[in-house]
Image: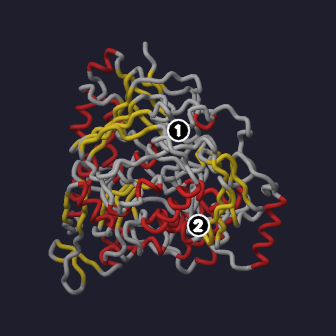
Amino acid sequence: MGVNFFHKSTAGTAAAAALILSGGLAMAEPMHGIAMYGEPELPPDFAHLPYANPDAPTGGRIVTGEVGGFDSLNPHILKGSVPWQLRFLAYESLMGRSYDEPFTLYCLLCETIETSPTRDWVEFTLREEAAFSDGTPVTIEDVMWSYETLGTQGHPRYRGTWANIASMEQTGPRSIRFTFGVADRELALIVGMRPILKKAQWEDKEFGESGLDTIPISSAEYVIDDFEPGRFVSLKRNPDYWARDLPLRAGFGNLDEIRMEFFGDGTAMFEAFKAGILNSNREFNSEKWESQYDFPAIDSGAVVKSVVPHERPSGITGFVMNTRSDVFADWRVRDAMLHAFNFEFINETMTGSAQPRITSYFSNSVLSMSDGPAEGRVAELLEPFKDELLPGALEGYALPVSDGTARNRGNLRRAIALMEEAGWTVQDGVMRNADGEDFTFEIVLAQGSTEEATIIDIYVEALRRLGIEPTVTIIDPAQYKERTNGFDFDMTYFRRGISLSPGNEQKLYWSCEAAETEGSRNWMGMCSPAAEAMIDTLLNSESRDDFLAAARALDRVLTTGRYVIPIYQWNISRIAHAKELTFPEALPIYGDWIGWQPDVWWWQEP
């Protein structure tokens, strides 16, 4: 979910309101949930989420591995490296997701939600029983402090929403109303997803500078029990968790312990899994899944291999080119880099050609761009920007395909032609411009990125055939985060997951404002009026058809921008785990996504 857009016409807003009312979206009274379009699928008296097992036993533990380290336990600020899972495991918000519905939220800390027909305001009433892990109640004061603090001192991802809140006021002993300063129908959902922190814990501390000195008090199922900087973090199930009997949490939080172990590289982590130090491991390499999971624990049945399908978009994974750097400002140079990247040969080398390639940002889903020219509503949305769109956006586009051999002659010839168009030619075996300056750039990778480094080694060999000698810099995770936060790289590994409900977060990824905001997710530095217009349409859509057209049009703008060299996608998840670790047969449409493992898993004794 997530972005900001503006409707300044009173007549337009009134018309939109009429459409919303006619569509049955008006909320005349407090409700148990909210959907972007229509009504929530689950009724007010639902017993549990469809993919959770309310009868799951409690007990056991899950131990997973991460490559890298950490120097902070606060996932809500820009400073420091933090275990990414803490943002989701250790905090709760007013509302919670159902990963069986793309655009629906249900009350969690709140008891009810109410909004106007035009969604220019939203009001929440807190549950009387909502409490932090120390037993103190969650209050409206905590909610208001959390929103203001995150919006002004927190990570940049929180600032856009805060800027769009015109007012925040307490309307009753347990109720709070947010009034919005812009027309953005998704804001009513977005504000329900901000983490709620305990104000009293932070009164004498510098929130934006906190690291390992403060173990957060939260209202979630799990609390941080123990940690060793850079080595491990252990979370224990809170026996006094306030929402144990809440339908939205039935079948959640079944494991007694969630432990994350940290390793210097992927090889060491896999060896730890084989040795039984870890008891669950996601595998992203299909060839490795087939050829290297033959160790004794697999043979004995102590570890099982599970394949989990999903229906969500591929997102984008690959190597991003920073357009803030002069070398990648010209789209023809970026296109040349795409042609030089011999995916078919790399895929055969890395996975035995078993892994399909990402073909666009929204591939593998109903939101993806179609083959061939843009048509219908998609073409209408893109037409006003035809003069700025890059080749392929309107006419149709597909990634370069090689002949599968290491030489990749056809694509390298095309890469040389593109470089010539951009003012670069091979002179005495070296790619140079008219002033005799060498074409070179720096590829920055984090220590422990074994697979990415292997891919880059193959890529560098191909670039040398063009007379290009890039510098590959491998640095520790703390330095890597500092450099990527400051956009201090030419090319680096890049991954952005995209949900079936893209919204306001798309501006954090692709907007002009994010391109200029340190720590934002717009690593490529793109600034495209067409992309911003598609996101605004995405957010203002009053029908499913318009929403789909906007997503497909945005996919065309992003893909033909040639910002990222895509690698393979994961249209299934491969998880090897202890046989006792069990998950429900009913899978959400998101499959193995945030909020599935370990949330609804349990430990089943033989």
Q: Which mark is residue 490?
A: none
**Residue 9's x, y, as percent?**
73, 79
Q: Earlier in the sequence, mark 2 or mark 1?
A: 2
Is the residue marked by circle 2 packed among few (<14), some (14-19), or many (20+) residues within 10 Å?
many
Determine which residue is flagged by label 1: 591
Q: Residue at x 64, y 73 (%)?
A: 181
Is the residue marked by circle 1 packed among few (<14), some (14-19), or many (20+) residues within 10 Å?
many
Q: Residue at x 53, y 75 (%)?
A: 389
- Disc 2 residue type? Ile
Quadrant of the rendered structure where residue 529 is?
A: bottom right
Left or right: 261, with 135 as reference point: left
> Does residue 33 appear in the picture of this structure?
yes
Q: Residue furthest left?
A: 428
Question: Mark 2 and mark 1: span between their CA atoms?
Answer: 25 Å
Determine which residue is flagged by label 2: 535
Q: Residue at x 54, y 51 (%)?
A: 499
Assign a secondary structure to mark 2: helix
**Up/down of 586 relative to 455, above or below:** above
Q: Residue at x 44, y 59 (%)?
A: 399
